[in-house]
Amino acid sequence: MRRLALLVFCLIERQVRQALGGNQTMRGLYPDNRAVRPTGRMILYHLAGLRIRAGTTSDPPTILITRGVQAHLLELLGIDETRPRWLET
């Protein structure tokens, strides 16, 4: 199970860095807003605060974003907060 967790951790970090392209740095991960290379730890730290609003039959669940860096990370990961992937079949 640890190996699977480590694999997912590394794939998340890799996806964000590849999506950033070029110098692979971004702002907003630290309070001083410096440009740094995102690490898996920092990515998961910021995504840990995400919440999901329950859906209904006419209104699907939505990821609730409280900070701009969360929206940026979800975008880099290719996740649409208004249409979580588990809804796609």
Image (tube, rainbow, N blue to C red):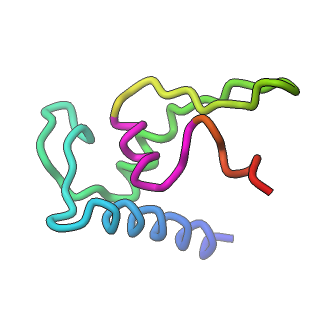
Judge whether 24 appears above or below 69 on screen.
below
Q: Where on the picture, by quarter, is residue 17?
A: bottom left
Q: Position of residue 39 (x, y in %)?
A: 32, 58
Q: How many marks?
A: 0
Q: Nearer the viewer, residue 59 or 62?
A: 59
Q: Position of residue 83 (x, y in %)?
A: 64, 41
Secondary structure mostly seen in magenta is helix
Which residue appears at 55% of the width and 44% of the height? 80
Q: Position of residue 49 (x, y in %)?
A: 50, 32
Q: Is residue 28 left or right of residue 76?
A: left
73 falls in the magenta region:
yes
Which residue appears at 34% of the width and 62% of the height? 19
70 falls in the magenta region:
yes
Q: Where on the picture, by quarter, is residue 24?
A: bottom left
Q: Position of residue 82 (x, y in %)?
A: 60, 35
Which residue appears at 46% of the width and 55% of the height? 77
Q: Residue furthest front?
A: 58
Q: Nearer the viewer, residue 53 or 6?
A: 53
Which span is picked out in magenta? 69-81
Give the quarter of the figure containing the C terminus: bottom right
Q: Nearer the viewer, residue 12 or 56?
A: 56
Q: Is residue 79 left or right of residue 42?
A: right
Which residue appears at 49% of the width and 28% of the height? 65
Judge whether 38 appears above or below 74 on screen.
below
Give the quarter of the figure containing the N terminus: bottom right
Judge whether 58 appears above or below 10 on screen.
above
Q: Residue furthest right?
A: 57
Q: Nearer the viewer, residue 31 or 20?
A: 20
